Amino acid sequence: MTLAGCGGAGPPPHGLGVARASDPRALARQLTVAETALRDPATPPELVSVAGRTAQVAYLALLDRPDWDAAVLGGVPAPLQAVVRRNTAAGRELRAMTSRPPTTIPAWRIVEPLPAPQLRAYYAEAQRRFGVPWSVLAAVHLVETRMGRIVGLSTAGAQGPMQFIAGTWTRYGLGGDVWNSRDAILGAANYLAATGAAEGTDTGLDNALFSYNNDSRYVQAVRDYAALMQADERAFLGFHAWQVYYRTQSGMVLLPTGYESSRTMPVQQWLARQPR
């Protein structure tokens, strides 16, 4: 099966560009095709992006159906089972951090991230300078703003691609621009190193991530995504392709590149504007 044909039978809800699989067997097939393509160096770059987006939509579907876990895992090749487990576990940890999905769409701007090689070079520079693993920095970047796709403030007022509160940035931002990707990545590495990651131990890294976001579920999700990239660097290319899906009380909504709003708006108002 090719990537073009691995969408499954279900219609894409609320603007999702890739159809969701309608049963666990189809979902296992979708994940197998996408994750295999991601890990194959012969896959053309444009299909790597398709594979990343396809895998993302498949994982979003699986998050909603824990009763499918056993069947899906049984339907993917053994080498991919740990990949599926970690991605699913990370997604569920992050989802559990929000008890009540909002009824509004945020005041964000959605842009294309910097090219993957450029970001990878920034992570490597930060690792050399501060000793924080590049994969951890990439995972934080992924969780915080989808590697820079989201331009806007968090509900707590954090800003920039690595989401810093103003006072923390003043202390750890090295005099840089919080909205500049290189500066923000270096600042994040500086902060993580200062709060425990420089110890070079799992405990130190966990403590640093907990300082970054005071929730053990956040720590575990970042560690899961980082472990996937550390085990196979091509996983980073898949994550780089992930789009911005925003969970609301009306379901999961795609905020595409080019979305821009200076104010929050009701979900139904946004959906009414979208082609179905």
Image (cartoon, helix red, strand yellow):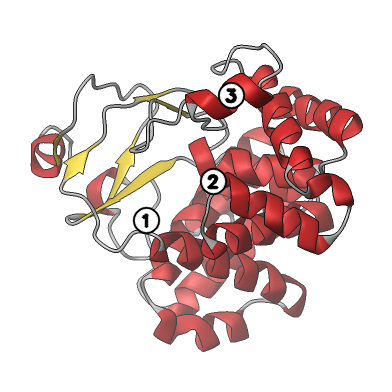
**Between marks 3 and 1, how big is the CA–CA gap?**
40 Å
Please determine whether, in this image, residue 71 is positioned above or below residue 222: below
**Residue under the image location 75 percent in, 59 percent down:** 227
- Residue bearing mark 2: 143
Q: Which marked residue is nearer to the observer: mark 1 or mark 2?
A: 2
- Residue bearing mark 1: 19
**Where does residue 146 sit, x and y in percent of width and height?**
52, 38
Residue type at mark 1? Ala
**Residue under the image location 69 percent in, 56 percent down:** 207
Please determine whether, in this image, residue 65 is positioned above or below residue 44: below
Q: Which marked residue is nearer to the observer: mark 3 or mark 1?
A: 3
User: Secondary structure beneath disc 1?
Assistant: loop
- Residue bearing mark 3: 169
Q: Is residue 141 visible?
A: yes
Residue 161 in which image quadrant: top right
The mark that comes first in sequence, 3 or 2, is 2
Crowding at mark 3 (Cα within 10 Å: few <14, some 14-19, many 20+):
many
Q: Is residue 41 visible?
A: no
**Where does residue 72 sit, x and y in percent of width and height?**
53, 80
